[in-house]
């Protein structure tokens, strides 16, 4: 009877544990990270009775947590990808919204400006038309400035988001290390702390949302590592993340673990996923790329417009030659010196400067100058950061893509400098003139002809020769300024003695040149201007170049200003469609990010569902188990009741004997 009672007792205990486990599953059906548990049972050792072995009941050997390590790893990896994709799509969506409205953005402002330039070329004597062009220039400059400011605000917001993500991640890292300690203590005492294991796995999943990590089991602990192998958790020890300026380019942000006072950085393109990876890429690559693209437009357009303005004449008859004190040679303000950022870890005394040599060759990119070696073996490696294309030099200065780089002082091995020719172009664009009458719509010189019968000559072009300031040497450099040739506006008559020979006479100095050779189609350069004729002259042809009067209605310089809209940039795009290309690039990046987000979220849902099929609580199944274990409990109670009845019967028989 004692055996039957013992069997009943073990059965009722097993049923109770199973009921309690099932109830706990039902209670935690909506708890994040909870893994379904089951009571594990085993038959007790049988008891020998003579030649027979009789069952002794059941033992509860434990409560097993249903969890798949493989599916858990897959879910963690999917969470890291989704965390990065979700953040990237959200960030790029903000930039895309800046470019989305074609009627109020930079594109509309540029189109309106060049439309007003065209209006001035059609009616150069109109003060109202000139004022409209000035207002359009100010509006366009304001749009450039505003777009740059918005990008800067996005950068500042991104820095704050990185800090928030790091704070959250470090809290989670500390929790994982603490859980490792608690789990080790519980396991050392022979227990299996299922709730702590669930919490640790949930923390690892949460951490992957911020930064991609790998988790490796070691004994009862889980060690956590970044994509670059740096540890975040080893046993009960936590290694928190930190952020700081990139020593090679202090304007950029790096994130990683610390070694002493140095941050061992994650590469922005190889973070293993997570929101931090997307934030780093957005701040260090996407924002600078967009700033460089719109900055290139601002620098090239302002330089080109200023070059044309400088060779013209305003409504009052002022030009760079006849009245430089009253003439504004710049329509837009001159761009400041090119920023050069020295690496914070540089050890040399070198100073690097950069200047524009030809703005039409500018690329929408920053450059990194790194120094390798010393003495006679020193090398200077210039990397175009937009595509990582490298060029190695053995000396300085050097000119690359319209930028001349100069180095003074001594550079040591490992010194780094970041050069930003167009990064701040949109911020720096402003209008230099204050009155529409200052727009140099006219050419300061006019051409008239007196041709003989049979001559096919016509005027091709008349331009001032590009000169360096104060020099008389022609230069192709841009932006250009014009040297003061005192005879520029002297009336000059060119007299052809044949189709291949001419002389010219300056009516102010009353001097006539010696005979000059002439090749049809080649320019004639006199007193700082350059005249190109079409056709072939004959003996007796005369061409006169003379000053243009004030309020003359001349529009030749305004026509040249309008041509800036179709100027071809180094990227192959023209000024008027380069911005459209930038809008297209941003839209394409956003669309790609959204597609990646959809795929990553679907992958995460699939991985989560697979893990839930093992670990998740099914209420229908648990309800069935609850009924089963309830019946088991009732049956076990019946066994005890039966044993008690038998015992009472035996007592009655014994007492009546």
Image (cartoon, helix red, strand yellow):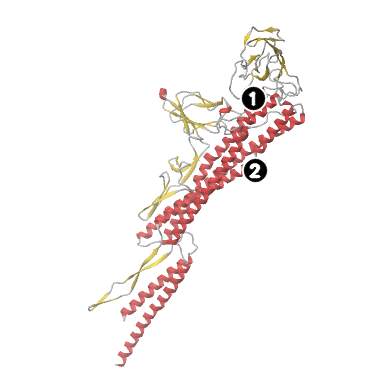
Q: In this view of the protein, which residue sits in the foreground, 174 or 516? A: 516
Left or right for 384, reference 108 = left
Classify mark 2: residues with Cα within 10 Å, few (<14), some (14-19) or many (20+). Answer: few
Q: Name the residue under label 1.
A: 307
Residue at far left of view: 51
Q: In this view, does 422 lie above or below 51?
A: above
Residue at far bottom of view: 656
Residue 340 makes an appearance in the image: yes
Q: Which picture quadrant has residue 551?
A: top right
Q: Is residue 375 above or below residue 187?
A: above
Q: Where is residue 58 in the image (x, y as percent from the top left)?
A: 34, 72
Q: Name the residue under label 2.
A: 101
Q: Position of residue 158 (x, y in %)?
A: 55, 44
**How far separated are the C-alphas under marks 2 and 1?**
32 Å
Left or right for 526, reference 374 = right
Q: Position of residue 241 (x, y in %)?
A: 46, 46
Left or right for 62, reference 554 = left
Q: In this view, does 9 lie above or below 507?
A: below
**SS at mark 2 in the image:** loop
Quarter of the figure with the C terminus: bottom left
Sooner in the amino-acid sequence: mark 2 or mark 1: 2
> Which mark identifies residue 255?
none
Q: In this view of the protein, which residue sits in the foreground, 484 or 641? A: 484
Residue 175 makes an appearance in the image: no
Q: Which picture quadrant has residue 286?
A: top right
């Amino acid at each position: 009877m004692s055996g039957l009672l013992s069997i009943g007792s073990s059965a009722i205990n097993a049923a109770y544990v199973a009921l309690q486990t099932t109830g706990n599953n039902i209670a935690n059906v909506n708890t994040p990270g909870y893994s379904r548990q089951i009571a594990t049972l085993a038959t007790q050792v049988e008891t020998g009775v003579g030649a027979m072995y009789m069952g002794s009941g059941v033992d509860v050997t434990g409560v097993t947590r249903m969890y798949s390590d493989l599916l858990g790893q897959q879910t963690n990896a999917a969470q890291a990808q989704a965390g990065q994709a979700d953040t990237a799509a959200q960030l790029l969506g903000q930039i895309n919204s800046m470019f989305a409205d074609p009627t109020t953005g930079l594109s509309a402002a540029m189109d309106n400006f060049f439309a007003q330039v065209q209006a001035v070329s059609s009616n150069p004597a109109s003060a109202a038309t000139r004022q409209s062009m000035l207002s359009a220039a100010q509006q366009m400059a304001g749009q450039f400035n505003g777009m740059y400011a918005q990008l800067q605000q996005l950068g500042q917001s991104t820095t704050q988001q990185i800090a928030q993500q790091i704070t959250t991640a470090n809290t989670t890292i500390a929790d994982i290390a603490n859980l490792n300690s608690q789990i080790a203590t519980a396991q050392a005492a022979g227990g299996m702390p299922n709730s702590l294991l669930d919490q640790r796995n949930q923390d690892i999943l949460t951490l992957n949302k911020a930064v991609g990590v790998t988790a490796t089991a070691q004994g009862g602990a889980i060690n956590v590592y970044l994509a670059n192998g740096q540890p975040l958790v080893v046993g009960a020890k936590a290694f928190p993340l930190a952020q700081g300026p990139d020593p090679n380019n202090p304007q950029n942000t790096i994130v990683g673990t610390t070694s002493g006072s140095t941050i061992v950085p994650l590469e922005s393109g190889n973070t293993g996923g997570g929101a931090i990876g997307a934030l780093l890429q957005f701040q260090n690559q996407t924002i600078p790329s967009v700033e460089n693209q719109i900055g290139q437009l601002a620098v090239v357009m302002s330089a080109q417009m200023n070059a044309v303005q400088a060779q013209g004449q305003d409504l009052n008859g002022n030009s760079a030659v006849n009245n430089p004190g009253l003439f504004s040679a710049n329509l837009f303000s001159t761009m400041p010196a090119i920023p050069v950022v020295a690496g914070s870890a540089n050890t040399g005394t070198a100073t690097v400067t950069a200047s524009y040599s030809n703005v039409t060759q500018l690329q929408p990119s920053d450059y990194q100058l790194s120094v390798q070696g010393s003495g006679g073996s020193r090398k200077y490696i210039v990397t175009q950061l937009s595509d990582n294309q490298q060029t190695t030099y053995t000396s300085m200065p050097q000119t690359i893509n319209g930028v001349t780089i100069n180095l003074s002082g001594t550079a040591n091995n490992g010194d780094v400098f970041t050069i930003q020719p167009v990064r701040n172009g949109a911020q720096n664009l402003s209008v230099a003139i204050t009155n529409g009458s200052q727009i140099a719509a006219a050419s300061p010189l006019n051409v008239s002809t007196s041709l003989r019968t049979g001559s096919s000559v016509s005027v091709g072009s008349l331009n001032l020769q590009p000169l360096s300031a104060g020099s008389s040497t022609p230069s192709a450099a841009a932006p250009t300024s014009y040297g003061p040739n005192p005879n520029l506006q002297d009336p000059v008559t060119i007299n052809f003695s044949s189709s291949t020979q001419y002389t010219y006479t300056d009516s102010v100095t009353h001097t006539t040149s010696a005979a000059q050779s002439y090749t049809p189609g080649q320019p004639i350069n006199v007193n700082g201007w350059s005249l190109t004729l079409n056709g072939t002259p004959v003996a007796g042809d005369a061409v006169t170049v003379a000053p243009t009067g004030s309020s003359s209605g001349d529009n030749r310089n305004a026509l040249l200003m309008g041509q800036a809209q179709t100027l071809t940039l180094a990227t192959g795009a023209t000024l008027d469609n380069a911005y459209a290309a930038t809008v297209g690039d941003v839209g394409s990046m956003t669309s790609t990010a959204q597609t990646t987000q959809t795929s990553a979220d679907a992958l995460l849902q699939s991985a989560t569902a697979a893990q839930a099929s093992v670990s998740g609580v099914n209420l229908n199944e648990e309800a069935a188990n609850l009924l089963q274990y309830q019946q088991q409990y009732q049956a076990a109670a019946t066994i005890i009741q039966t044993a008690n009845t038998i015992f009472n019967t035996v007592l009655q028989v014994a007492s009546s004997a």
